[in-house]
Amino acid sequence: MAGTDAPRRQRLAFLLPVYNESDGIAEFHRVLQETAAVLEADLDVQFVYVDDGSRDDSRERLIALREQDPRVVVIGLSRNFGHQKAVTAALDAVDADAVVIMDTDLQDPPAVTVELVERWRAGADVVYAQRRSRTDTWFKRTTADVFYRVLERTSSIEIPRNTGDFRLLDRRVVEELRRYREHNRFLRGLTSYVGFQQEAVLYDRDARFAGTTGYPLKKMVQFAGDGIFGFSTAPLVLISRIGFFFSALSAVGILYALGVRLLTPERAVPGWAFLAIILLLVGGVQITMLGILGSYLGRVYTEVQQRPLYAVSLRAGSPWRDETSYR
Ligand code: UDP
Ligand code: MG
């Protein structure tokens, strides 16, 4: 909640994960500065960039940005840990009254922040930006849609559809989120899970300004798994359902074979091809079910190892840490 009688100006920190954004990062920062200029009428603003082990010169470019703009803080991870962990590193580092998580490829228009802040001032703790439209490829839109539908049907919490990680979080929510240290992270699920007053603001998602997506199919599948397996045990229930279904089916088959053997004059059960198909089908289903078990088991394994979530190799500038104002 926004207290208006605070002794200092309120602080807003932008949490900005960066992976191979060399070609677009300067333009992103320029657009972001325009929005910051509006916000700075009554807020202090800080930009916390997390370079998630980029392979291009994004890190050098971020450091260059910092030389021109003292509000920039750069945290460099020691390798590529993935988007969700990069955002986590930023969440861990800041001390602000509110944070805004945003992609750095200009797909999340910085100007929307003004509206997010308005809602926050009006009392919301989480203001997520919901996509009214998106200009991604057909493939990405369809797979995302299927994913959100499955998630909605299977998970125990309500995760709003068509939202990414573009959102504003009040300090209280950030402090809650920090307590969740799971490895297979699905931050938008966690945000729903912690509760508080949540509101949506609609926006149009733009195309990437430059560069290519850091979420190729493999990472997307992994991420979808983290969402579904992390917030639902429905796939486990599915295993026994499918088991029951095939048991019932085989009972029918047994009765049929017995009937043919005992009651028909030929006394022979035809169809080895039929048998082979059934065998293959049941074998395939069994392996799929083992795969589901494996998905949970693998996640359990990474969690029990209790490794730190990421490693930092560079810090340039310090995020707000104490009660004195940044300026
Ligand atoms: N990103 C990251 N680490 C990664 C992949 C992506 O920090 O391993 C960042 C990326 O720079 C961008 C945001 O996460 O700011 C979203 O990634 P991207 O735009 O590639 O995903 P898409 O929009 O295609 O889903
Ligand atoms: Mg993007």
Image (spheres, rainbow, N blue to C red):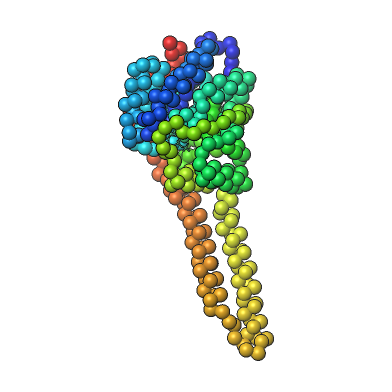
Residue 217's place in the image compared with 51, above or below, is below
Q: Position of residue 323 (x, y in %)?
A: 46, 14
**Outermost bottom residue:** 265
- Please state which of residues 306 and 250 is positioned toward the viewer in this rendering: 250
Q: Is residue 306 left or right of residue 271?
A: left
Of residue 296 and residue 169, the one placed in the foreground of this image is 169
Residue depicted at 49% across the width and 50% down the height = 296
Lateral position of residue 290 relative to residue 77, left or right: right
Quarter of the picture containing the N terminus is top right
Residue 19: x and y, percent? 39, 34
Instruction: Report if residue 128 is visible in the image.
Output: no
Expressed as whole percent of the image width and height from the top left, the position of residue 246 reads: 59, 66
Residue shown at the point (43%, 38%) measured from the top left: 213
The picture quadrant where one finds residue 160 is top right
User: Which quadrant of the figure has residue 258?
Assistant: bottom right
**Location of ligand 1 given as a quarter of the image:** top left
